[in-house]
Amino acid sequence: MKEDKNLHDYEFTNDQYSQLDEIIDKYGKSQKNLIPMLEKIQQILGFIPISIQERIAQKTGISENDIYGVVSFYSYFTMKPRARHRIQLCLGTACYVKGGKEIAETIESMLNIKQGESTPDGRFTYEEARCFGTCGLAPVMSIDGNVYGKVKVEDLEEILSQYK
Amino acid sequence: MLIKEWADLENIKDKLIVKQKLNKDGKRARITVHMSTCGIASGANDVINTFRHLLKESKEKNIEIKTTGCIGICSKEPLITVEITDQEPIIYEHVNEEKARQIFHAHVKNGDILSEYAFVRGKESEIEERLKNGGEILGQQVVDNSIKAIEEVPFFNLQERIVVRNRGAVDPYKIDDYVARDGYKAVYKALKEMDSDNIIDTILESGLRGRGGAGFPTGLKWKFASKSQTADKYVICNADEGDPGAYMDRSVLEGDPHSVIEGMIIAARAINAQKGFIYCRAEYPLAVEILTKALSQARAYGLLGNNILGTNFSFDIEVYEGAGAFVCGEETALIHSIEGKRGNPRLKLPYPVEKGVFNKPTLISNVETLANIAPIVLNGSEWFAKIGTEKSKGTKVFSITGDIVNVGCVEVPIGTSIRTVIEDIAGIVEGDKNIKAVQLGGPSGGCLPVKYFDTILDYETLQQLGTIMGSGGMIVMNEDKSVVDLARFFMQFCESESCGKCIPCREGTRQMVNILNKICEGNGKKEDIDKLEDLANVVIQSSLCGLGKTASNPVLSTLNYFRNDYEALVK
Ligand SMILES: Cc1cc2nc3c(=O)[nH]c(=O)nc-3n(C[C@H](O)[C@H](O)[C@H](O)COP(=O)(O)O)c2cc1C
Ligand code: SF4
Ligand code: FES
Ligand code: FES
């Protein structure tokens, strides 16, 4: 992975830090709770930058290496902040066969970003997702967890406009 | 309340049957909204809210609104079932707020069926009874013959339901619904009337094989796991379902969570484990929510925790949320993931049944495998062994998608032909393009052309043809679709999901994607096809885990059956 200087620079509020410490206390110091703990932390902060990983390492004694290894391995975790709304487009087999690619191209050109990126105005992050298990409704897209089935290129404008 | 005796289970069942009965003086009508992720994604929430609103407005006291999981036919969602005293139930398809309003006023309040919105009459859970009685059920009047009866619809009629025995009939949030369908009786039997050897022999003799992909005999795995005398052992339900295009495990977890929990308790009793995990993927938030609720209800009844059913056997289960990595479905990677590490696979030896989670003996079984256990224990191994083929017993649930009419989850006896599933159950779109191929078994599987559609679905037969049963994803493609493009898709999937530990898998899949890109974009040469084939074999031979070992299958099977398609694309 490319080392991104920005990964170190994020500021969090004292309130966020104290929430973070609370979670760490709750899950304890054992590596076996690392993944559920990180899931919780990401729910609160939205992402897990290096500075936070360092803090977790100091407080739990789990090595920074192990934490970085886990965060970078699982696609659920991200080290970059996400925008206000998260678009996840399924590119599983069923969705792919049913025209998911055209939807992907349309989203990329509408928002002028590529997969994994956020719009400069902080409105959308666009990600490709693996199967949501609603393949019967392919192609499938989810925005902030709301699942849309049988998405058509001509519907995209209208769907996205609901998220300001 | 703690359940301790058989009579406690019977009591819950009897009470619920009375409570659910519709009659003129008490409860007169029931609306059931089928609400799995796919139903909700199609608008089931709007539908149920409309009904709730109308019910409140009408001040009627004798109408009930209920939810259940899906009934398997996703392409007709949102689906609802309306039942009225003395009338045959009606299932409505593609319901929206407006239709819900009309159905409420005409059908629910006045008994006037809206046949133009109806899908079928009758309930799936009553099919057998209806077939016996020539389509009738005592006390249910057929009011509208223009609507097809459920037993006349091949989609339902050709299925054999063991794993999905309770679909559309139980509310996944209510343990009593499950108990009323004879749930937890198998746990009672296993804990109070059988010993570990009895249980293992029953599963062995049933011939059940693992439904997560490889088809290893389940009873044998249990036997190995029972051997070790260690105190701490684990039972893990593999609910990762990473195979894109497969969703039968989600459907079972969301629709009937207790069927999986019951299977796990019996497995734990058989091998003497104290602790279980359900490893569920993060992409399935509804399944996680439903499972968590179901576990706490089972605990409240004393079906999990200390001294289950008052015996000296104790066992509890925890849901563990995966964090998005296909390779974590592989057993050894899953073990690392539960230990809080990267999901890198390791060599299979020692087997997880000897050294698994935290180095303790661990039994890992798939969702569907576990959902089969209770019926086998309750009905006996002979009953189960009668279904299926010589070497593969029972049924298999397939998720069928692609260029077909009825998209959804179907459970058929092993040995059913591909043609039956695709032409009769799924249905070919009339006047549409010809069907070209079916892709089975996901990224580890292969593509079969139409001329093999009379092939039966069983482990060995499919393997001989270069594909696999796998977890049961089935994607039907018409002649507009390019199999080369599909092979590229699977290769890209494996490349991005490779854990990167072995070079052949990490670099080999990348090179194969490059070649496939070249071919698909029209820049390929004839030699590229040979290079692709060579590379495919190298990746198979020199990869460590199942991901790398099978990643080439989609390429090899399409090269085998559709070489012309590749050749047409190169110079
Ligand atoms: C790359 C890879 C991914 C897998 N994904 C799954 C999965 O999502 N669910 C599953 O049950 N088995 C999966 N398996 C198979 C499991 O490793 C294991 O064989 C299975 O869970 C055992 O259960 P069973 O005997 O009931 O089939 C996968 C295997 C490999 C190699
Ligand atoms: S074959 Fe691929 S996925 Fe499996 S261990 Fe090797 S690199 Fe990882
Ligand atoms: S392939 Fe897209 S939801 Fe399953
Ligand atoms: S209708 Fe049940 S899985 Fe879709």
Image (cartoon, helix red, strand yellow):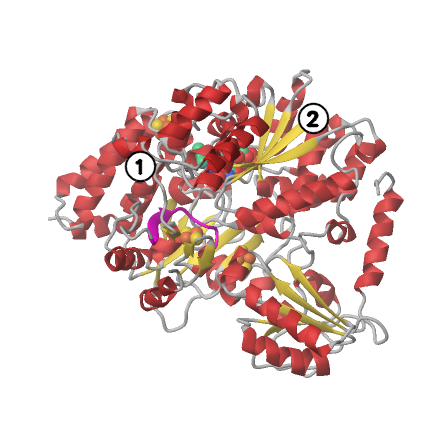
| Callout 1 crowding tier (Cα within 10 Å): few <14, some 14–19, many ≥20 | many
- Relative to residue B313, is residue B148 depicted above or below? below
* The residue stretch that appears in magenta: A123-134
The residue carrying mark 1 has its beta carbon less than 8 Å from ligand 2: no
Say which amino acid is labelled 1. Answer: Glu
Query: Looking at the figure, which quarter contains the C terminus of chain A?
Result: bottom left
- Relative to residue A157, is residue B381 depicted above or below? above
Residue B224 visible? The answer is yes
Mark 2, residue position: B274
- Residue A105, numbered circle: none
Q: Chain of mark 2?
A: B
Mark 1, residue position: B495
Q: Secondary structure at mark 2?
A: loop
- Relative to residue B315, is residue B65 depicted above or below? below
Residue lying at 84% horizontally and 71% vertically, measured from the top left: B26
The stretch drawn in magenta includes residue A126: yes
Say which amino acid is labelled 2. Answer: Gln
Query: Looking at the figure, which quarter contains the N terminus of chain A?
Result: top left
